[in-house]
Every structure is written in C-alpha cells, then in structure tokens.
Image: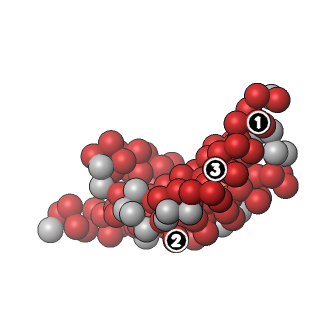
Amino acid sequence: ADLQQMLAKILTSEDEKLMLAMSRLVVEMGDWYLNELLCRRLFELDSDNLEYISMLGLAVDEQGRYKEAEVFHHQCLEARKAALGVAHPDTLDSMNSLALAVEQQGRYKEAEVFHHQCLEARKAA
C-alpha cells in the first residue's frame, strides 16, 4: 500500500525533476507502462517540451504500440525541424525514431526513406 500511495503522489506531482528521475529509474527496471504514465504527466505539465514528447513516443514504442508511437515521433520531428533545423542531432534522433516506428509496422519503403534522409543529414553535419 505504501508503494501505491507513493506512486499516486508522484503521478500527481508537479515536480518535473522528481518525475524525470523516476522515469530514468523505471526505464532501467524495464517498466515501460509506468514510464508512459510518468511521461504523460510530464507532457501534461509542459506540452511544449519536445524531450517529453520524444520520451512518450519511446515509452509507447517499447510497448509495441507503434502506430501511436509514430504520431508522437512525427509530432516531435516536425517541431524539432522547425525549432532546431533538419541537421540538428535531436532532430535526427526523432527522424530515426519515426523510421523505426514505421518499420515496425511493416512499412519498409517508407521507413527506408526516413533512414536514408537521416543518414544523409548525419553525413552532411
């Protein structure tokens, strides 16, 4: 009961540092569902934080929900392109995450295009 109460308190907290620390811990433990809950709460607190969108996409991706993950990765990619430019490492990470989510859905040609764009941008950087 104490652990449940602690988790409930963390998931309603506004302490982003605490939630980020917990997120890292549960990722180490391999608990992607709890990580998703933490990421969703972080996203609620700051929906403009691109790292939170990326983390949420990864948490959903790791649970095999690739179509849902694709939406988050795409949203993050477009925002990072606009804010950071196409060749920024964070943008390229988002492009790679999107490619992997698309690939996991069996859309290999589309994934290949993203992988190729990512590779070319990394070479140019």
Give me the residue at 50% from left, 62% from top: 106
The kind of residue on which mark 3 rests is: Glu
Q: Which of the image's four quarters has the C terminus?
A: top right
Question: Can residue 23 be seen here?
Answer: yes
Q: Nearer the viewer, mark 1 or mark 3?
A: 3
For this orientation, the residue located farthest to the left is 1
Give me the residue at 57% from left, 57% from top: 108
Q: Which residue is mark 1?
A: 120
> Of marks 3 and 2, which one's residue comes earlier in the chain?
2
Tell me where residue 17 appears, x and y as whole percent: 51, 49
In three-dimensional space, the C-alpha distance between marks 1 and 3, rounded to whole angstroms, equals 12 Å
Please tell me whether mark 1 sits on a helix, a strand or a loop. helix
Q: Nearer the viewer, mark 2 or mark 1?
A: 1
Between 23 and 115, which is closer to the camera in this rendering? 115
Q: Which residue is mark 3?
A: 112
Tell me where residue 15 appears, x and y as whole percent: 50, 57
Tell me where residue 70 appears, x and y as whole percent: 58, 65
Residue 68: give its label. Answer: 2
Q: Would residue 31 be found to the left or right of residue 16 on screen?
A: left
